[in-house]
Amino acid sequence: MKKSTLITTQKVFILLIFSCLIWNIAVNAQKNELLFGHWELQKVVFKKTAHIMSTNNKENFTNFFKAALFKTLDKEKQFMVEELEIINTQAEELANQYYQSNIAFKPTGAFYTISEKPLSGEYLMDGKKLQMEWETGDKNNFKIVKITAKELVLKDKHLKITHYYNHLTKMDVDAKWAKLKKEKELECTKPDSARVSAQKKEEEKINRKQ
């Protein structure tokens, strides 16, 4: 092979690598832009079990996470009461975190959720990976299964749960905030269950003495 031909081949090879790098950067930038905004959780799927958010049943939602967490234990730990108690607590925390929630990703690398217990944190998107660190210190590593202008599908690498999100408009977000605010206001007007229960017990004691 002539020297001039070898140099030309090397240039073409370098140009090809450079083009691939530019293309990857452009694709990742496009994905990042698609991620920005608000997304509402529509359903979660674990193996063949799915929980649709419109079912409005938080107990079933909690049990869904319990089943996924249980599968992460080895056979010995599955029979340990202590481990099962930990799973119950973790499942409740996950249910509070995701139940009827939507999540907002900002260009700054920050995110926050609108849910029963709102949380925030920071995220890093790297190709088909999405790493999220919550303000509590908890971390999630997701595989980006699908991302379009209307749909976001993430798979939790640890729990093997797939999360399906739909994109929300500003009007949808405002309506969500208004609904949560109203629910909190109504919750504040409800009587304290512990106080009512204690008062009822005292009345029963008095009635027995009489």
Image: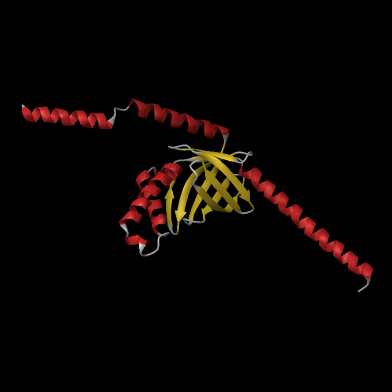
Q: 149 left or right of 92?
A: right
Farthest residue toward the bottom?
1
Image location of residue 44, percent across then percent down: 46, 50
Instruction: Give the residue at x 45% y 42%.
Output: 97
- Vertical relation: 71 (above or below) 133: below
Which residue, as the protein is rendered here, is positioned at the far left? 210
The correct choice, above or below, for 19 with respect to 53 in the image is below
Residue shown at 90% from the left, 65% from the top: 7
Quarter of the image for the N terminus: give it: bottom right
Indicate left or right for 72 with 170 as reference: left
**Towards the viewer: 151 or 82:** 82
- Image coords of residue 22 (percent x, y): 76, 52
- Quadrant for the C terminus, please: top left
Q: Is residue 40 above or below residue 198?
A: below
Q: Residue 134 location in percent, x, y? A: 51, 43
Q: What percent of the width, then of the height, locates residue 121?
A: 54, 41
68 is higher (above) or lower (below) than 100: below
At x 56% / y 40%, what residue is drawn?
Answer: 111
Whether residue 88 can be seen here: yes
